[in-house]
Amino acid sequence: MLKITNLTKEFQSGDINVKAVNNISLEVPTGVFSTIVGKSGSGKSTLLSLLGALDKPSSGQIDVDGADITKMGDSKLIKYRRDKIGFIFQGYNLIPNLSAIENVMIPLEFAGISMKERKNRAQKLLLQVGLDESKQLRKPGKLSGGEQQRVAIARALANKPNLILADEPTGNLDSATGKIIIKLLKELAKSENTTIIAVTHDDGIASEAEITFRLKDGKLVK
């Protein structure tokens, strides 16, 4: 369960005080795929940074499965990002000189998992997202955009996170491949019992979500 209460993030721009996120409250149950929709400048990226503990709010609370991350110190936040959050990016952010399976194994290595366990889990995750064994040994440059995003999704799932944050996950994909990726994310939210939030400007993606939140000028709108 993700619960945000009166979340605000303010910036000073010259003499002007800007509320990039303005008193937002929302809830997303565990096992639900949801979207945050808004135009450029609406506050989507700032909100995602706050949820991923990449930035700290000016005020308000962010509770993930009962833990308020806004009260955590730096060392606990590092552990939280490593163990409880999975990130999926528009540009995939895969390491080009590593194979698909090696990319998925990286978060498990940081978590101190043995080599054998890392390899087994990475193989299973890649099969789960639809990447067969022959493609698991390929480097990202030898995979299509959709296949690279599948690797990125498997990597996000590696440490069994409570929350997965996807930033424009279909932005670099054609519409048909994008629909497949969104369907996969919806299925994984249920099968992995994790909360998935995708930030997008695409109403087509939003229509596939169980819950959609709309942002405008840092505020939730209907």
Image: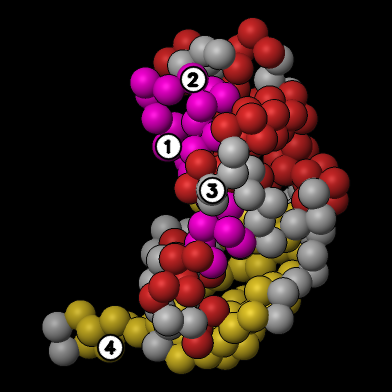
User: Would residue 168 appear left or right of 191 to someone viewing this image?
Assistant: left
Name the kind of residue labelled 3 in the image.
Gly
- First of labels 2, 4 by sequence position: 4
Question: Which quadrant holds the C terminus?
Answer: bottom right
Query: Is disc 4 surrounded by few (<14), some (14 to 19) or many (20+) residues within 10 Å?
Result: few
Tell which tag, 2 or 4, sits nearer the viewer: 2
SS class, disc 4? strand
Q: In the rendered image, is residue 23 in sight? A: no
The label number, if any, that marks residue 99 in the structure image:
2
- Badge 3, how many Cα within 10 Å: few under 14, some, many 20+? few
Ranked by sequence position, the earlier of labels 3 and 1 is: 1
The quadrant of the rendering that contains the N terminus is bottom right
Within 10 Å of disc 1 (Cα), the crowding (few <14, some 14-19, many 20+) is: some
Q: Position of residue 73 (x, y in %)?
A: 42, 81
User: Who comes first in sequence, dot 4 or dot 1?
Assistant: 4
Residue 17 badge: 4
Q: Determine if residue 143 is in view.
A: yes
Q: Which residue is mark 1?
A: 93
Q: Residues within 10 Å of mark 2 (few under 14, many from 20)?
A: many
Q: Are marks 2 and 1 in contact (CB under 8 Å)?
A: no
Q: Nearer the viewer, mark 2 or mark 1?
A: 2
What's the residue at 16%, 89% (across, down)?
15
